[in-house]
Amino acid sequence: MTPAEQSVRTRAICAMAPVVPVLVIDELVHAGPLATALVAGGLPVLEVTLRTPCALDAIHIMAEVPGGVVGAGTLLTPADVRAAKAAGATFGVSPGATDRLLDACAEHDLPLLAGAATASEIMALLERGYTAMKFFPAEQSGGAAFLKSIGSPIPQAGFCPTGGISLKNARDYLSLPNILCVGGSWVAPKDAMARGDWAAVTALAAEARSLR
Ligand code: 3PG
């Protein structure tokens, strides 16, 4: 899959909802009910970070939840790409981009939201054919003000910013023309997950869904 084809796919995925939950799953038993709760609240696109031992198994389970579109986050290496694909991820997300990572996504047909946080990084991804990118860590890298500014000289790059985004500031990003969607962990709080309070997760998802 060429980078341009990947970007068509990731743009379509980002267009499905204003917010992509960024999920850190510690307990495999949470995977199914968490995905069901988020989809029920109107957030079908889910990013499972490969930061916990059960993350790949969680992707496998969540990919079976009707209506869900499950991706793997924190892809750092070609091995991560292969593992994500084998687990059933339909897209990948990375905080940055390396040639080896981009080559692996092309080889294994995994649409990637590669990360960029400077003008040169954005230009390097555009040069390779990517027009949809992650912007991370969003708040620490200049936030909505940076993305508004970069949209003037480089309007062809579209972003999914993540890192430090919540209900309080999500609209600052979503009101910009170069924002595809935002990502954030606030819709799946650790305490609600630990309690198994899936109704609370659905309520947070519905609130996030109404942002756009
Ligand atoms: C991450 O990679 O942890 C995401 O960007 C989520 O960040 P957040 O917890 O600040 O929403």
Image: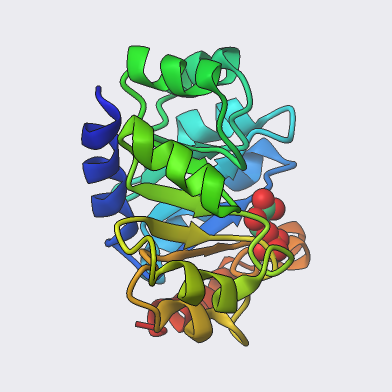
Figure quarter occupied by ligand 1: bottom right
Q: Picture coordinates of residue 185 (x, y %)?
A: 64, 62
Q: Nearer the viewer, residue 137 or 117?
A: 117
Residue 152 sits in which quadrant? bottom left
Question: Residue placed at 34% from the left, 82% from the top?
Answer: 212
**Can the viewer see residue 71 in this picture?**
no
Q: Picture coordinates of residue 96 (x, y %)?
A: 60, 38
Question: Residue placed at 34% from the left, 66% from the top?
Answer: 17
Q: Nearer the viewer, residue 27 or 10?
A: 10
Question: Residue placed at 55% from the left, 14% from the top?
Answer: 78
In the visual, does 38 lie left or right of 108? right
Q: Picture coordinates of residue 171 (x, y %)?
A: 48, 85
Q: Picture coordinates of residue 176 (x, y %)?
A: 39, 79
Residue 29 sits in which quadrant? top right
Question: Residue placed at 25% from the left, 22% from the top?
Answer: 1
Q: Nearer the viewer, residue 16 or 119?
A: 119
